[in-house]
Image: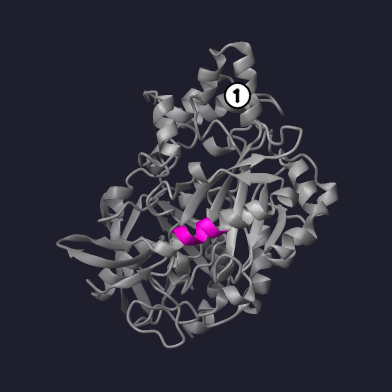
Amino acid sequence: MKIAVVGSGPSGVAAASALLEQGHAVEVLDVGHTPDAAAEALAGQMRATLGRGERPGRALYRALHLGPGGSKRSLWAGLATLLGRVEATRSQKRILGSTFVWDGADEGVPVENEVVTRSLAKGGLSNAWGAACYSWREHDFAGWPFGAMELASHYARAAALLRLDQTRDALARAYPLYGDSGADASRNPGSALEGLLARWRAHEGELASAGFTPGRARLAVDREACTRCGLCFYGCAFGAIWHAGQPLDKLALRYRPGCFVQGFHEEAGGVRVHGREHGATLEERYDALVIAAGVLSSLRIAADSLGLHDRTVPLLDNELYLLPLLALGAKPAFGFRSRFTLGEAVLAMEAGVVSERPLHLQLYSFHEFFLAELADVLRVLPGPLQDLCWLLLNRLALAFVYLPGADSTRATARVVAAAGGPGRVHIDAAPQAESRAILARLIAQLRRVRGPLGLWPLPALVKSTPFGFHGHLAGTLPMRESPGPLETEASGRLHGTARVFVVDTAAFPTLPAQNLTFTAMANALRVAGGIAGAVG
């Protein structure tokens, strides 16, 4: 069969790989923004000047943080952002000095009433993610038309696609391991948080009694390619951090960048896709259509195509809090200028302790990315005061605290028709008071186990989700046992169609606290594997 996949993010690439394995002819239709020439030049400079373990200079930090022609933010603006006094935006995060990840999103995926992360880049939001990958447990699939066992083999295949680096440790009790389970924790040194992880292993029983399951982070990172330059947050010039564009370039398919899919209509034995390709009319027939355009774009394509405008659907997200933590003990624990700056340690918080549902905490060394101008200020301080400041910074970690969708902002979306063009996505959202109460109970619980944990939370500095919606969006075209309009079957087929399938997180009925990408790819593999049978 000739099958079109709309979108080149992780779900689209996973679906395409499964379809190719079955012998189908696959075309990926994608807007496909890529890094500009300045970003490519900067990446080349990094590869030429940063050897293994070398530290970048301040000029490179500035170029990555500000981009060409950028203006310097003040330290006080950075502090105000961290403290929640002003609102940050996703556009402030550049990848290799470029904004290509976010370019054109306002025009291509118009959103009303809220700020929502979205991307039209080749590889989608995986160009800017933290590479964290965690499986879901059986109770995470409550409300789904199938359970965790249905995804077991697909998780293993997704782990191989992601070249997932995962360790066999206590965290497997919270998040089951699939695929190559990696090395034992004692044989995987090198983390900036290594001392902390060793402390947690020694106090696993006490932490478990308090509801915490600790472990090393599971990341889609090629450790062999990593030079440990400490620039992970700015984009990896060495290809060590996985993004969906990497496997896409290796697949034997037809990749068509410059395509904006406006909609589809079904006809006898096929489905016709229409939109624009490099400014010209796009009109092409396929045997089946796979939609993996992102939660809002997938909804918009479905609503525009089926004439289902102004129909309210759920929109799920993980509310995120940034919680600074101070290391206890005699020695500095982390290193403000760490050589690896993605999350390296995890605490899974079980249900029934501070919330009815599990929480997820990812720990990072506190890094210049969070306050890019701080190092310059410290250098002008008197020596003893500078030493004291560095000592305090080397004791700081930052926990990214994720709440499940059910405990996060309540939101809905609907597509508003637009004459002669794609519809606009209107979002209504209302925060839940309970989310702050959950966070307060979590902080109290962290204090109770400060000895075994080796950390003291600094709640006065806590910062709520800093970018509007965090970006772990899901649920706009949810799978149901008996689907209705703008819902999908367990097979992934969009209700009201015969040959159209949804494989991204738009099809998720619920959203637990841990990262959704690993499960999204596993589910995309599952759906794509059944398309031939589903269309007969």
Magenta stretch in the rendered image: 436-441
Task: Residue at the far bottom: name it.
Answer: 482
Q: Nearer the viewer, residue 532 or 411?
A: 411
Q: Nearer the viewer, residue 47 or 255?
A: 47
Query: Residue 387 at what x, y percent from top left?
Result: 65, 19
Instruction: Please say whether residue 437 is one of the residues in the magenta stretch.
Output: yes
Query: Residue 237 at what x, y percent from top left?
Result: 58, 34
Q: Which residue is mark 1?
A: 389
402 horizontally vs 426: left or right: right
Name the residue at 52% across, 46% down.
Answer: 459
Instruction: Please say whether residue 305 is one of the residues in the magenta stretch.
Output: no
What is the total number of numbered labels drawn onto the structure image?
A: 1
- Label 1 element class: helix
Query: Residue 354 at what x, y percent from top left?
Result: 57, 65
The secondary structure that dominates the magenta segment is helix
Residue 300 visible in rendering = yes
- Depicted 56 relative to depicted 501: above or below: above
- Depicted 48 relative to depicted 204: above or below: above
